[in-house]
Image: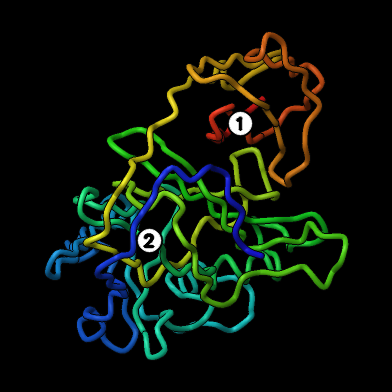
Amino acid sequence: MFLALLGSVNVSIAQPLNKLNVGFEELHDSLGTSGVRNGSRGNATYNFSQGEFNLHLDTDWDTSFGGYWAGGWALSNLKYTTEETSDFSKHLYASKPGKGSEKLGNVYAVGTDGSYIQNKDPINQSMAGCYISNSTYAYNSMKLGDNFAKKFDSNDSFALIVDFYLSGKEVGSQKVWLADYRSASADDHFILDTWQWVTFQYANADSIVFHFESSDMGDWGINTPKYFCLDEVQLVSGANMEEFPIPLDLEVYPNPFNEYIKIDIEEKVKSIHLMDLSGKVQPISVENETILNTSMVSRGAYILTIFTEGGRVHHKKVWK
């Protein structure tokens, strides 16, 4: 229900010999009963290493204006879950479930736009999946609205875009719905308030980068708070990596576009779709397979999805 795949699977993995979930619980004592590790004390990276397993997360602490968390990851055990007016200082580092994803878990990671996890040994180790949930800050903003973002209603949605990279090239993408009000039936509307398992579809990527899409857009981009929570990154080793994903080599321009979009791609294109951030397909015509007439498209942000004859899928965010 919560996961939509925007890519084709190009990785074949034999039966894994060993796996381990990285849940950050070793930091529980150092964080105290209610603490956050966000780089303010100089701890700007998280490096996990146990036997053959390793995982790397970066934190960006900016010392300007007295210091603030500027990106990357914060590690937290805060337990603010009350449904109330969103409060940046109180709710930013809190998971909506109020704990980690483990049965007795306390610590989890808080990510923002551009946060990434890095696998430094993709030959011998893969990142198989993780648990995802909303932050209390984003949840309350969507549930109740605030001074910057709207209360979610019919046709609204908020999604986490999971982009996979290998050797600096994007090899695929997935979409995880953090909130979805697009259904005609109100019974299907939801804002994610539990931990949801996400299986990574490009397991032996060496980096995974997280971005967002929202139906609530303003002059400066997304209004919905761009924060989410992550826990229990599953690492698998000893698997036989039978095939590596081959990056899809393409260029899309101009971006922002006006009357047309040109696509330079080596593979033969099967079909192309342009959708707005609510998932509505836009009126375009395809000329010479790789030139799109977009004169009927209104100004805004869109997702361009390209399907190739070889079964590959690529998506790119574009603007008019």
Front-most of residues 30 and 67: 30
Q: How many other residues sit within 10 Å of disc 1, few (<14), some (14-19) or many (≥20)?
A: many
Occupied quadrant, residue 294: top right
Q: How is the image coloured?
A: rainbow
Image: 149 above or below 318: below
Mark 2 and mark 1 in contact? Answer it, CB < 8 Å. Answer: no
Report the side of 15 relative to 89 (left or right). Answer: left
Residue denoted by label 1: 307
Q: Residue at x 22, y 86 (%)?
A: 29
Return the residue found at the far right.
Answer: 184
Give how far across and how far down residue 207 sits, in percent.
32, 47
| Residue 108 location (% of width, % of height) | 37, 74
Report the side of 23 relative to 313 (left or right).
left
> At x 53% / y 34%, what residue is drawn?
312
- Mark 2 neighbour class, 10 Å CA radius: few under 14, some 14 to 19, many 20 or more: many
Is residue 71 shown to the viewer in this render? no
* Image location (x, y in percent) of residue 220: 59, 39
Tell me the kind of residue under disc 2: Ala
Q: Tell me how far mark 2 sits from mark 1, CA to CA.
A: 24 Å
Q: Quadrant of the N terminus?
A: bottom right
The first of marks 2 and 1 along the sequence is 2
Going by the numbered disc 1, the residue's amino acid type is Phe
In the rendered view, tell whether residue 303 sits above or below residue 31: above
Q: Position of residue 221 (x, y in %)?
A: 60, 41
Q: Nearer the viewer, residue 244 or 72?
A: 244
Residue 51 in the figure: left or right of residue 99: left
Which residue lies under the disc numbered 2?
128
